[in-house]
Amino acid sequence: MGPGVAADSIVNLCGAGGLAIAILIFRARDPQGPLTRRFAFVLGIVAFVLLARGVGWLTGSATLEQLAVAAAAIIPLGALLVVEGMLRRHAPRAVKLAVLAGTLVLAPAGLLAGGDWAERIEMALALFQLATFAVCGLLLLSRDRGSLSEAENRGVFRLGIAALAVLPFILSDFRAFFPGVPVRAGALGALLVVTFALVADTANDGRRGHVLILGLRISAGLLLGLALAAVAPIADTADVIRFAAVTLAGILFIGLLVDAARAVVGAGAPGLLDRIANAPPGTRDELIAELARHPPFEGARRLSAADLLPFDPEILAVALGDRLVVRRADRPWNRPADDPAGERLAALMATFGASHLIVIGRDPLDLVAVPVPLVMADRASETALLLAARLIAAAPEMRA
C-alpha cells in the first residue's frame, strides 16, 4: 500500500466517524425536526460513502469501492431534499425528475461497472454532482427572501457559504479530473463543514470562543502534520500535504468525539442549576442544603446572627454594597486597602474558610459561606453560583 492510498483511507475513515458523530449531535438537538431528518439522511449517505471507500482502499476490495460510487450517486438527490427543506417549497418538477433520473442511472452503473468503465462512471458522477450542486445554488440564490424568517435566511446563507467552501475538497476526490492531487480531501472538507455548522448553531455569546477553539484545533493539526513531515526520512511536498491532511482530519474527528462525550456525560449528570431548579419548592435552608451536595460547593453553610455579630453586620453591609456574590479573589472589592469594612469582610471569609459569600438578605444581613476549591473555581462554577444565589434569595424563609 502506497502513502497516497494510506492517507486517503485514513482521511476518509476519520471523515466517516466525524459525520456519524455530527448526525448524533444534530438528532439530539432536534430529534423530531423534519429538516434535521433531511440533513441526517444526507450526512448518513456521505458517511457511508467515506466508510466504504476507506475500508475498500485499505483492504483492496473492489466491491466496496463500487458500493461507495453507487451510494455517492444518491448524494445529489439528498442535497436537493435539503434545499427544499431549507426553502420550505418544492423544486421545479423538471429539476426533480432530472436528479432522480441521474440517481437511478448512475447508482446501478456504479455498482455494476468495473474495469475501463470505472473511470467513465467516475467522470459522469462528478459532472452529475457538480451540476446538481450548481442548480441547488441557483435555487438558494433565487429564493423568495420575504417568505422566510431572518433565521431561515441566515441558515440559507450559511449553507451556501459551506457549499462553496467544500467544493475544492470535493473536486480533489475525482482523480479522473485531477490525477495529481496528493490526497483525496473530500472527507476533510466534510469534517470542516460539520464542525463549523455545530459552532454556528451555538448561542452568539459563546460562538466566538468556539470559533477560537476550532481555529486552535485546525492550527494544531496542520502544525502536527508539518512536524511529522520534518522527522520523516524523505518527505516531498506531496508527503507534507498528506501528513497535514491526516493529522488535521484526526484532530477534527477527536474533537467531535470529545465534544459528544462531554455532552453525554453532562446530560447524564445534572448540574447544580438543574438540581436546584428541578427540586421541589423549599425554604432557603433546603436550597442551601441542595447547594452543599454539589461537589464544587460542598461545605456551604448559612451564617447565623451569632456568627456575624463579631464582625459588625452594619459595617459588613457597607463592604458588600449591592453585590449578590462576593469573591475573596476580588479583595479589596474596590475599596481602600485599609478600609475597616473591607478588613472585616476579609476576616469573616478567612474565619469560615469561604472563597465566596452569597448575600441572601440585607435587613437583617443574611449570608452563606461557600468554600469553592481553587481547581474548581472556573467561570461555569461562578455563573452557577450566581444564579443559585438568586434562586436562594427568592426562596421563602419558612414553608407556608
Image: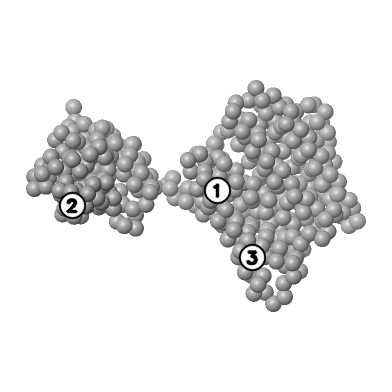
Q: CA distance from mark 2 to mark 1?
A: 44 Å
How many discs appear? 3
Of the pair 181 and 255, the residue shown nearer to us: 181
Figure coloring: one colour
Look at label 2 and name its amino acid. Asp
Q: Residue at x 79, y 31 (%)?
A: 96
Instruction: Find residue 158 and report its horizontal and vertical position in percent.
Output: 64, 38
Q: Earlier in the sequence, mark 2 or mark 1?
A: 1
Q: Position of residue 104 (x, y in %)?
A: 82, 39
Mark 3 highlights which residue? 225
User: Disc 3 marks which amino acid?
Assistant: Gly
Q: Is residue 67 visible?
A: no
Residue linked to disc 1: 211
In which quadrant will I find the C terminus? top left
- Residue at horizontal 34 percent and vertical 54 percent from the top: 376
User: Which residue is tagged 2?
Assistant: 338
Please give left or right for residue 237 compared with residue 305 in the image: right
- In the visual, does 269 lie left or right of 93? left
- State the residue lying farthest toward the top: 146
Q: Is residue 134 above or below residue 230?
A: above
Q: CA distance from mark 1 to mark 3?
A: 21 Å
- In depth, the one of 355 and 48 nearer the eye is 355
C-alpha span from label 3 to label 2: 56 Å
